[in-house]
Image: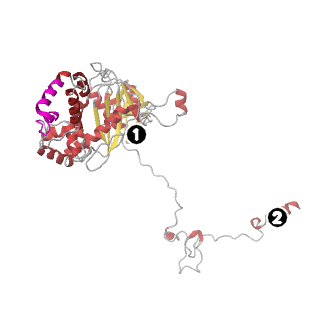
Amino acid sequence: MKGLMLNAKDEKRGYVLNGVLTKRWTVGEGAELLRISERHLWRVLARYRREGVAALVHGNRGRVPVNATPRDVRQRMLQLAQGPYDGANYSHLAELLEEREGIACSRWTVRRVLRKAGVGSPRRRRRPKHRSRRERRAQEGMLLQVDGSRHAWLPSGEELTLIGGVDDATGTVPAALFREQEDAHGYFLLLEGLLERKGVPLALYSDRHSIFVQTAKETLEEQLLGRQEPTQVGRALEELGIQWIPASSPQAKGRVERLWQTFQDRLRVELRLAGAKTLEEANQVLGAFLPKFNARFSVPARQPGLAYRPLPEGLDPKGVLCFKYRRVVASDNTVQFARGTLQIPPTPKRASYARARVEVQERLDGTLVVVHDGVVLATREAPPGPVTLRARKSSRSLPDRLVGRVSPAGSRGAQGPGGVARGPAEEGRPDPIGAKAPRKPAPDHPWKKSLLTKSLHQTH
């Protein structure tokens, strides 16, 4: 046939069919060579006898598939990938096209169209290293991996720190927030949101950051007690009954590390599309992003139900998720703190709290609370103390008639007694009344005798 092009597969099929027709191979051997059934080989032979070489070419060759992506859709897809959706990977781009543009296509269609046009994925994959995988926990809430990711999240390139946690059993993100830096205040806010939405998890898995564990050497008191003083976050985890598990390497908490890679691919694009410019706007976009992310990437746990526990009866989360400091009440019933002084008034149980050991809580809303034996004491800002004037360390005061006449240090002008500079009109005048002239030692003064003369005199 004119214009008929055969590929290697077609030529192999014709070679086998000719061999079967010439009795070189049996029908069973020809079917095995072509990897088809004997019944289908009889069909191919019948068509080959009827149409000749044209029967070797597949019937769909040269036809446009009914499910082919139209050309205008491919061009539109390419424009969006290089325009507003620049930086989105193939999977995320397919979701954005369907959600925002109404273009329903699979990830593989997006990948094929973009790679054919020479547009690669912004995410570069490194060669995987052999590591043994840890099995997921059986139930949601049994283990939460937490960490912070410092990255240029905002479109302006400003760097923020995203603090969040991923559930080990399901891969969902129950709570996350943006902060200026990774600090204990941010982890307190993370735990506060987690307690409100889910409850108290059984364990927390993190790196050995100084927020969770003390990095300084043990003091003598800590060595005598047999344990190191916990950090503020470590103390809060103990009060909530949450087990803290430290990771020995970033690969050990690989689930949360891979979470940050996914967020840096997807959330950064979402922030740019939403036009987020500040920390508050970024947290708003994050709040709308988390439900979609959890619905897309969550996996079912091996056991149904939740392992999250409710808060213990009578436990105030605000009194746990705060900064606590030990203080001793002064004799005037005041407590000194960095931000001021608190006055403790008398109570029906106790008239004075002088020399009592109390606990000052600096809560997340900025308020200060004083607690004694588990009871919150009513406090108010103490009035300012009396002003006490004290002598300052300085040179002796001079008489009024000599003020302003002291020569500056290092001056070469003529000076009178006591370092008082003499002006041109005062040179030649006697010293002021009461001023003593410098006394010059006599020639036979003991200070002027040499050590040798002293020793000889003592010898004789």
**Mark before the other along the chain sequence, 1 or 2:** 1
Q: Are marks 1 and 2 in contact (CB under 8 Å)?
A: no
Q: Residue at label 1?
A: 337
For label 2, the SS is helix
- Coordinates of residue 79 in the picture (x, y in percent): 17, 48
Residue 352 can be seen, yes or no: no
Asked if the stretch drawn in magenta spans residue 347, the answer is no
Question: Which residue is farthest front?
Answer: 22
Give the side of residue 207 with respect to residue 401, left or right.
left
Decide which of 346, 91 is in the foreground and name it. Answer: 91
User: Can you tell which mark lies on residue 452?
Assistant: 2
Residue 337, x across and y down, in percent: 40, 39
Task: Report the quarter where the C terminus lies.
Answer: bottom right
**Dot 1 alpha-carbon crowd within 10 angstroms: few under 14, some 14 to 19, many 20 or more:** few
Q: Nearer the viewer, residue 110 or 393?
A: 110
Given the image, on which type of amino acid does mark 1 rest? Answer: Phe
Which is nearer the eye, 107 or 298? 107
Q: Give the quadrant of residue 365.
A: top left
Real-space CA distance between mark 1 and mark 2, rounded to the nearest whole angstrom: 65 Å
Q: Quadrant of the N terminus?
A: top left
Vertical position of residue 107 compared to residue 431: above or below: above
- Identify the element where label 1 is drawn: strand
Density class for disc 2 (Cα within 10 Å; few <14, some 14-19, many ≥20) is few
Which residue is rendered at x = 20% and y = 22% of the image?
Answer: 38
| Residue 41 position in % (x across, y down) | 18, 25
Q: Residue furthest right?
A: 460
> Magenta stretch mostly in which secondary structure?
helix
Q: Does residue 244 appear in the picture of this structure?
A: yes
**What span is in magenta?**
41-66
Q: Is residue 293 left or right of residue 343?
A: left
Q: Residue 458: where, in percent of width, then height? A: 85, 60
Name the kind of residue labelled 2 in the image. Answer: Leu
